[in-house]
């Protein structure tokens, strides 16, 4: 069975928009936002702070709830679409689980992330907050991410789908599939067939294992 992990920041949660909103509101209202490139993995790196400690305080002490808890999804109704996609994957496509993960979480941002997932009506069964990018792969077989380190740390036999941004294009050739956003991934009707085929190739499942998975899918439909 296959487990899919989807990165929160930049893939599901629009945290870049929150970074800019509260930076302009309370840190530097005169900052010229027109010089920013919003299509990046982490907009925080383009904002000007007095020091690294000030930047860290902004994220983890002063505005963790506003940034991590109050953000909007990357697109309208994304969570509703995600819930339906996850349901379909489990009941009809033979996937074991769909979960989410978020890197660089600490202390107050963790509880804020749980608030975000709750208010968004997210119905995933796995929520993982790994300390390192490589730890993501301990929990999932297929990962949808914008993070370069996650892509580069992919073990053999796993599958990575890159959400391409302007600052992660250099690892696109390391990814198994590349899309512009999560909705594009979920709307690709042929992707699941490709993932199943690639997973079979990676794991070299026996005919007995394939039959077992098929029977499990049939049982799920009957129970439903």
Image: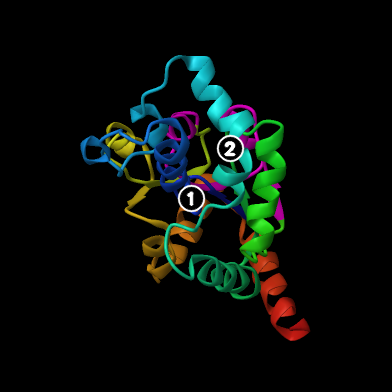
Q: Nearer the viewer, residue 76 or 192?
A: 76
Q: Which residue is mark 1?
A: 201
Q: Secondary structure at mark 1?
A: helix
Quadrant showing the N terminus: bottom right
Disc 1 from disc 2: Cα separation: 45 Å
Q: Give percent across and percent down for residue 160.
A: 46, 44
- At horizontal 47% and vertical 36% (from top left) the residue drawn is 26
Tell me if mark 1 has few (under 14), some (14-19) or many (20+) residues whose alpha carbon lies within 10 angstroms of its own: few
Tell me if mark 2 has few (under 14), some (14-19) or many (20+) residues whose alpha carbon lies within 10 angstroms of its own: some
- At horizontal 63% and vertical 34% (from top left) the residue drawn is 105
Q: Secondary structure at mark 2?
A: loop
Check the image and report above or below for 13 versus 90. above
- At horizontal 55% and vertical 72% (from top left) the residue drawn is 80
Residue furthest out toward the right: 223
Q: Give percent across and percent down for residue 48.
A: 36, 24
Image quarter for residue 133?
A: top right
Asked whether 223 falls inside the magenta stretch, the response is: no
Q: Nearer the viewer, residue 43 or 123?
A: 43
Q: Which residues are magenta?
A: 126-153
Is 33 displayed left or right of 129 in the figure? left
Q: Are marks 1 and 2 in contact (CB under 8 Å)?
A: no
Check the image and report above or below for 189 versus 142. below
Q: Nearer the viewer, residue 131 or 211?
A: 131
Tell me which label, 1 or 2, sits earlier in the chain.
Answer: 2
Q: Give percent across and percent down for residue 219.
A: 74, 78
Disc number lying in front (1 or 2): 2
Q: Give percent across and percent down for residue 175.
A: 38, 41
Q: Is residue 67 visible?
A: yes
Quadrant showing the C terminus: bottom right
Q: Which residue is mark 2?
A: 63
């Amino acid at each position: 069975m296959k487990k899919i992990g989807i990165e929160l920041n930049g893939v599901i949660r629009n945290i870049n928009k929150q970074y800019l909103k509260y930076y302009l509101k309370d840190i530097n209202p005169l900052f010229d936002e027109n010089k920013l490139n919003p299509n990046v993995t982490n907009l925080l790196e383009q904002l000007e702070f007095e020091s690294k400690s000030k930047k860290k305080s902004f994220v983890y002490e002063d505005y963790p709830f506003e940034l991590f808890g109050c953000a909007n999804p990357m697109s309208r109704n994304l969570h509703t679409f995600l819930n339906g996609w996850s349901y379909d994957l489990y009941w009809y496509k033979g996937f074991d689980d769909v979960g989410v993960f978020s890197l660089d979480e600490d202390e107050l941002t963790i509880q804020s992330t749980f608030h975000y997932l709750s208010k968004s009506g997210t119905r995933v069964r796995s929520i993982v907050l790994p300390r390192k990018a490589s730890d993501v792969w301990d929990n999932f077989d297929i990962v949808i991410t914008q993070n370069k380190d996650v892509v580069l740390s992919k073990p053999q036999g796993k599958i990575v789908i890159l959400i391409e941004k302007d600052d992660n294009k250099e690892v696109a050739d390391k990814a198994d599939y590349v899309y512009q956003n999560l909705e594009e991934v979920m709307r690709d009707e042929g992707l699941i067939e490709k993932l199943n085929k690639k997973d079979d190739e990676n794991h070299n499942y026996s005919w007995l294992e394939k039959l077992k998975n098929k029977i499990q899918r049939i049982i799920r439909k009957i129970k439903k």
